[in-house]
Image (tube, grey):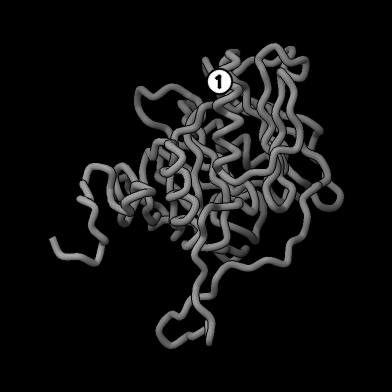
Amino acid sequence: MIEGIDRLTYCTDGSAENLARSKQCFMDWGLSLQHEASDELLFETLNGAQVRILHPAHLDLAGTAPMEEGATLREVVWGMQGDTALPATATDPHGLVHRFAPSRKRVLSLQGSASNAWGHVQRVNAPSPVYERAQPVEIGHIVLFTQQLAEAVKFYESLGFLMSDSYPGRGAFLRCAPQGGHHDVFLLQVPGKAQGLNHVAFTVRDIHEVFGGGLAMSRAGWKTQLGPGRHPVSSAYFWYFECPVGGLIEYNADEDHLTENWQPREFTPGPTVFAEWAIDGGIDGHTRRQPQVAAGGQFLSEKR
């Protein structure tokens, strides 16, 4: 059975500058650099899931074609538990390569901050944490633009993926196992939008780490695409940043956990369905305000 994403492989645009920016981006993102060479970088999340970044001329990319021009995602390795009838390799309708191998991820004992919802107090005599930066626990999901939605859904369902929710004719949220997070793959069909990578989500411990990680990325100079915010469909909190090796990267926390008893829902696409709320342009890491709002040297608590 597939249990989640074990490794992602990106390809740079071929320039030394792009490789260097990619290295700095993922280090600022909170991943651990495990290996570095002139044509390869290897990072890890806390649970051992990997992000690999290769130069286009790297031998491991020989014989494969990218799903879009420029820097982008080239391969997904899915971690497996137990026996499986899946092939070692499969290529989806977009040309993205998928491999299946025994999972190498580590089991962790860490926990996110408990919440004190009304009537359900879980955190007693303990404050919630404040994070100076994020350290992603694992790779949560990938999102792809497609112009072959029905064919792509059929491909993933043939691998055992299950529909969690959908925008009929426009998008499909798919999870790799009956029990687990809301989705591991989201396929989005936008009229006139070519196929390719939309974003990769990295799971962090809690909403506080979403904020702490996003503020740290802002202080480091990386550009917010959108966030922080909250998705109504999966209930998850998010913060999206532009990524040098294609698409966006997302801090993600507190998504819905589903079981085999879940009944897929259908939604009509719209801004409030994508985000219950979201901050356009992010929060500046120095002033703690939206970038377009001048702080004037005052604390947030001071009246203006």
Residue 192 vs residue 294: left or right?
A: right
Residue placed at 44% from the left, 52% from the top? 238
Q: Residue furthest left?
A: 304
- Quick check: 85 left or right of 178? right
> Could you say where residue 7 lies in the image, as x and y percent from the top left?
71, 38
In the rendered view, would you say 299 is above or below 175? below
Rendered location of residue 116, percent (x, y)? 46, 80
Image coordinates of residue 85 in percent, x first then y, are 82, 42
Which one is nearer the viewer's eye here, 260 or 229? 229
Quarter of image, res 43: top right
**Hey, which residue is sitting farthest front in the picture?**
297
Identify which amino acid the numbered label 1 is placed on.
Asn
Q: Which of 273 and 28 is in front in this view?
A: 28
| Residue 229: x %, y % from top left | 37, 54
> In terms of secondary structure, where does tag 1 sit?
helix
Nearest the eye: 163 or 239: 239
Residue of label 1:
18
Q: Residues within 10 Å of mark 1 (few under 14, many from 20)?
A: some
Residue found 73% across the figure and 67% down from its top: 109
Residue at the image position 51 percent from the left and 27 percent from the top: 244
Image position of 14 with respect to 152: above or below: above
